[in-house]
Amino acid sequence: MPRASTRVTFTVLATGAGVFSMLQSLIAPALPTVQHALHTSQSTATWVMTAYLLSASVFTPILGRVGDLVGKKRTLVAVLLAVLAGCLIAALAPDIGVLIVARVVQGVGGALFPLSFGIIRDEFAPGEVSGSISNLSAVIAAGGGVGMVAAGPIVSALDYRWLFWIPVAIVAATVLIALRYVPESPRRADGKVGWGGALLLSGWLVALLLPLSQAGQWGWGSARVLGLFAAAVVLFAVWLTAEARSRTPLIDLRVLRLPAVWTTNAAALLFGAGMYSIWSFLPGFVQTPSAAGYGFGASVTASGLLMLPMLVAMFLSGVLSGRLEPRVGAKALLTTGAALGALACGFLTLWHDAQWQIAVVAGLFGLGIGLAFASMANLIVGSVPVEQTGAATGMNANIRTIGGSIGAALTSVLVTGRLQPSGLPYGSGYTHGWALLALLCLAAAGAALLVPVRRTPHPATTAPAPAPTRAPAQVR
């Protein structure tokens, strides 16, 4: 592919994935505004986030696999159109029910991550694959930061509906460019979509993530929460059995058992717990009135600006990791990224009385996110057969999301478990939460140390695997 075409293709992939990542965090600071504008309750408004999470969790690995089978460009364009439709419906939504449906449609965009990684692996020159994946990972990581920073100014200057109108314009242009310039991948996996496996995968993911996101309102000991957790365990066991016996599994379990894959996924689970919890709870901490004994009474816009060092740091470190990976290896970068996350949370546990301290923590954690995101993607892409790229990277993204849900649920228990007479959490709840996140990130660094050192040439720098039926090769 000519260099100019490569740049255009990367721009399309980065724009689509970046917009989806931004949509993950863009609406969170505006939830109180949405609740008031649509005359709904706080518990109902939280479904705007929950619906998006569940939809993305289901569609990310399934459509990643569909792209491997039927063509990544075709699937990419279909997914972009779904995101476009979801944003348009959300911008016009007359009530909370329609907005929740729109968020479900937007969640289809989770498949943009594995599809983009697969297109890069298929279409870019071997020497460009690792750096391009790192750069795309930097954009994905920074997209979440853009959402946190931009939400306040957009809502203040315009209206919460512009949180969706702006993506409508961007995604519409991206679809047109993708149709013209993104090539269709020549490599296809053999087989067909295992819809039975897809249904079981969807079932256990929903049964796991739904109680994690709603347990604070339903109660951890409620019949709904316990019943869904039990259903998740049963469905997960049935899914494993069905995939192991299937001749055309949705997720090849042999790939998930590769040492480089399962250790990277373990690190993703633990680091995701810390990362999403910081995104969820640090803005609330700085927005708390100082009368509570902590916090700064910051506005949504001001709290977003305090997150700006995180946005800048994770983009720069993500881009830098592409230059460092050939020299130090993706394992070292993942370990360093998780360790920086642990250091940031440890710093936050001890020092959180001044806004400059929050800014330093945000920047330090941002460095960790940028390194970790890029190295996870490179480790997975470099360890699986070409025809499994979409499914494997989709599962890695899903596992990171599952970790985020677990981390957010545990942190919520610590933060909101005991409230002041004013209804605000005690400062000690946040302190205990930061300490937990430090331990989770430290455990992620430990998991990263278990990733096997590669002693064979990186697949991206060698000839493509000739046959889609080739068995996964162990990474040593």
Image: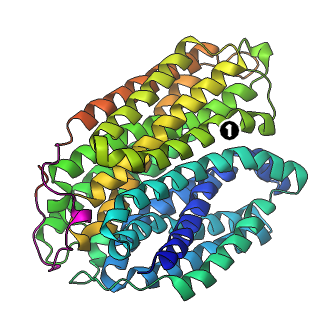
Residue assigned mark 1: 308
Asked if residue 343 is positioned above or below residue 13 in the image, the reply reads above
Give the x, y percent position of residue 287: 75, 29
472 relative position to 93: left or right: left
Asked if residue 268 is positioned above or below residue 423 in the image, the reply reads below
Q: Quadrant of residue 72?
A: bottom left
Q: Residue at x 28, y 50 (%)?
A: 233
190 relative position to 135: left or right: left
Give the x, y percent position of residue 407: 45, 36
**Nearer to me, 420 or 368:** 368
**Nearer to me, 266 or 355:** 355
377 relative position to 474: left or right: right
Q: Residue at x 25, y 58 (%)?
A: 382
**Nearer to me, 79 or 381:** 381
Judging from the image, what secondary structure is the residue with disc 1 in? helix
Residue 127 on the magenta segment: no
Q: Local crowd at mark 1 within 10 Å, few (<14), some, or many (≥20)?
A: many
Residues in magenta, as a range: 453-473
Give the x, y percent position of residue 302: 79, 34
> Which image quadrant: the N terminus?
bottom left
Q: Quadrant of residue 335?
A: top left
Q: How many marks?
A: 1
Residue 396 visible? The answer is yes
Q: Residue at x 29, y 62 (%)?
A: 392
Give the x, y percent position of residue 447: 26, 35
Residue 470 on the magenta segment: yes
Main secondary structure along the magenta-highlighted residues = loop
Q: Residue at x 29, y 80 (%)?
A: 193
Asked if residue 275 is positioned above or below residue 289 in the image, the reply reads below
Residue 200 visible? The answer is no
Which amino acid type corresponds to the residue marked 1 in the rendered image? Leu
